[in-house]
Image (tube, rainbow, N blue to C red):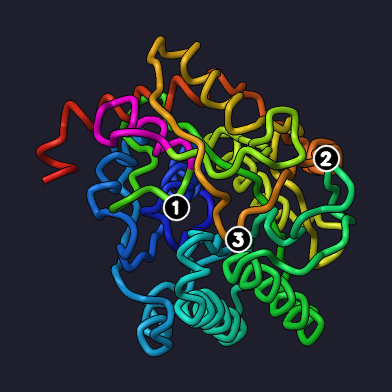
Amino acid sequence: MKHKILVTGGTGYIGSHTAVELINSGFEVVIVDNLSNSREDVLDGIEKITGVKPGFEKFDLCDFNLLNKFFQKHQDIKAIIHFAASKAVGESVAKPLLYYRNNLQSLTNMLELMGKYAILNIAFSSSCTVYGQPEKLPVTEKSPILPAESPYGNTKQICEEIIRDTLKASDKLNAILLRYFNPVGAHESTAIGELPLGIPANLVPFITQTAAGLRKELSVFGSDYNTKDGTAVRDYIHVVDLARAHVVAVERMLNKKQNSNLEVFNLGTGNGYTVLEVIKAFEISTGKKLNYKIVERRAGDIEQVWADTTFANEELGWKAELDLQTMMSSAWKWQQFLLENKSKYFS
């Protein structure tokens, strides 16, 4: 085994796929998750793929005392990948204080205890929402940070500032901020995938649930944006490609390859697709016709954003490899697996 890595939110969608890639790269993984938007049996899926069941503790990172006790037991942790956060744009507009409390307090607790226990490396799960509605596309890591369009996006901006200020106060800590675009798809094994509890907040689970007959129709939020077909544009990236970038980031810190103690990378494909193009790609890759309707814009949504990935490609030596058709077909395979096991997942 290589070093021990803490993955917070590791039973979640991106966290579980990252745990798989870490274990496959020889790391020992321990997960902390409060299971507020995930299930503990995700650990079985990780074990099915890797042959290794990661360590797991269930508690809320906002509880400073429990987190302190956890670090007392795991003083050999060498790096942290911090996913744990509330993450739905629409919900954050309705419940801003929940997002500020959960996303900020969990991070400040983590950083404070990293200093206490001399854990020097953190990869932070950030988001392209920090760019707001960019004035110029595609966005680079040097694009201006504009006012956030949602409380969720604002928490990511504030978290980045907290990390930046913490590193200024301590020259021993290292951080990599990974600004993702829109992760979709599922592991090819169908042992893990995106499993939203309740009504999905993201496009692709809504597409697959509609195709599966679990939802009557898909709502497309807005058709009057200044885009090629009037629907919003996003940069969709396969979750496995995204997970692999986290392994590269951790290895970069552990091997002291950083150019500075704080680095920022955009993680996307560099391609922008409209909502209607994603629907079409799903229909082509699966042969399933989707029932959808155009509705009003959703509060907090930006019009269009996609990444310039040149810096991440060249500096990290990482590049997204899986295309939109593969993203859609893998998401549908995962949905079919859920249907075959619906007594377990939808009881």
Q: Residue at x 42, y 47 (%)?
A: 13
Residue count near mark 3 (Cα–Cα under 10 Å), binned few <14, some 14–19, many ≥20: some
Distance from label 3 to label 1 (Cα)? Answer: 38 Å
Let me know if residue 220 appears in the view. yes
Q: Nearer the viewer, residue 216 or 321?
A: 216
Q: Earlier in the sequence, mark 2 or mark 1?
A: 1
| Residue under numbered circle 3 | 300
Q: Nearer the viewer, residue 37 or 250?
A: 37
Q: Is residue 298 above or below residue 324?
A: below
Residue 105: image x %, image y %? Answer: 52, 83
Residue 69: image x %, image y %? Answer: 37, 84
Residue 221's image quarter?
A: top right
Which region shows up in magenta? Answer: 203-218
The local secondary structure at tag 3 comes to loop
The local secondary structure at tag 1 comes to strand
Q: Residue at x 24, y 34 (%)?
A: 214
Mark 3 or 1: in front is: 3
Distance from label 3 to label 2 (Cα)? Answer: 23 Å
Q: Is residue 277 above or below residue 346?
A: above
Q: Nearer the viewer, residue 345 or 26?
A: 345
Let me know if residue 84 appears in the view. no
Q: Earlier in the sequence, mark 3 or mark 1?
A: 1
Q: Residue at x 87, y 52 (%)?
A: 135
